[in-house]
Amino acid sequence: MSEPEELRVAIVGDVVHRPAQAWTTTVHALLRHLAANGLADVVPEPLGIVGDVETDRLVPGDAGPASWPYQATEPGLASAARLLRAVHDATRGWRPPPSARWAHPPRSDAAAETSVICHGDPGPWNMAWTGGVATGLFDWDHAYPGPALDDVAYALEYFAPFRDDAEAVRWHGFTLPPDRRRRTEVFAAAYGLGSSAGLLDAVIARQETTADQVRALANEGVLPQARWVNEGYLDVLAARVAWSRANRHLFE
């Protein structure tokens, strides 16, 4: 039996065509809620699902590889944290439909006051940037109910970043090695946390969760995760955890 074909993302005009998943209907309901609560210009407008393809309105702004130089600045860094907080706040109180399905199991270990709908993948590349600041958040496939700290920790892995100096300069938009401690503090303050205490361990825990999520989706045959695992991506994720543990001094 041949492997399933991996569908690709295509942009036609201002419409994004993406592979539909079992959880796409739930995500569309969430996006409609966010738009109705002041974020119509921030998140994609869901247009529909036809067969195995969903369509959404493109969020305007720079994105993908173009995002890295913007996030490397302190104004860009702080704007991303404020954007994430605004999105989290808008999800509070939303009740998913009874038939809701998610890419990842909902987390039940968060207090009610810290529980949100996590974006699940809030890296700089999934944000739209206008004038050097983050103005939109798209690609909600990995959304799930859980503690807000999950998303904060995921974002910090890339915004701090939890990478060595060479990679930070080569791929993350920095011209000099970043001050990771300072950037963690700036992100925490802009998001509205009282301090950056505990964030290092939260990032490491989130890195481990990311590996678990990739493995679980791969086991279900979901693409591209199944391909990633076949290509050895779990070893890459394990190496990132090891790097974070070995370089605590850069953050503390």
Image: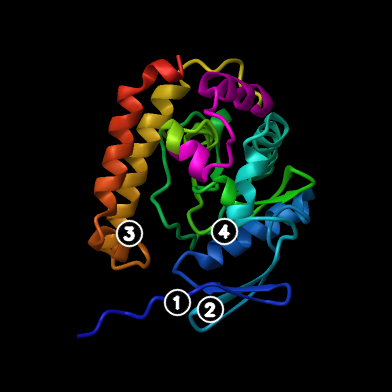
Amino acid marked by disc 1: Leu
**Residue 53, disc:** 2
* Element type where label 2 sits in the image: strand
In terms of image quadrants, where is residue 30? bottom right
Residue 33 visible in the shown view: yes
**Residue 240, disc:** none
In terms of image quadrants, where is residue 196? top right
| Residue closest to the far left | 1
| Residue 177 covered by magenta stretch | yes
Q: Are marks 2 and 1 in contact (CB under 8 Å)?
A: yes
Question: What span is in magenta?
Answer: 167-191
Amino acid marked by disc 3: Leu
**Depth check, front residue: 186 or 194:** 186
In terms of image quadrants, where is residue 77? top right
196 to the left or right of 90: left
Name the image quarter holding the C terminus.
top left
Which residue is denoted by mark 3 in the rendering? Answer: 217
What residue is drawn where x is 69% and y is 60%?
32
**Depth check, front residue: 38 or 237:** 237
| Residue 18 covered by magenta stretch | no
Q: Residues within 10 Å of mark 1 (few under 14, many from 20)?
A: some
In three-dimensional space, the C-alpha distance between marks 1 and 4, rounded to whole angstroms, equals 15 Å
What residue is drawn where x is 24% and y is 84%?
2
Which residue is denoted by mark 4 in the rendering? Answer: 139
User: Which circle, 3 or 1, is nearer the viewer?
Assistant: 1
In three-dimensional space, the C-alpha distance between marks 2 and 1, rounded to whole angstroms, equals 9 Å
Q: Are marks 3 and 4 in contact (CB under 8 Å)?
A: no
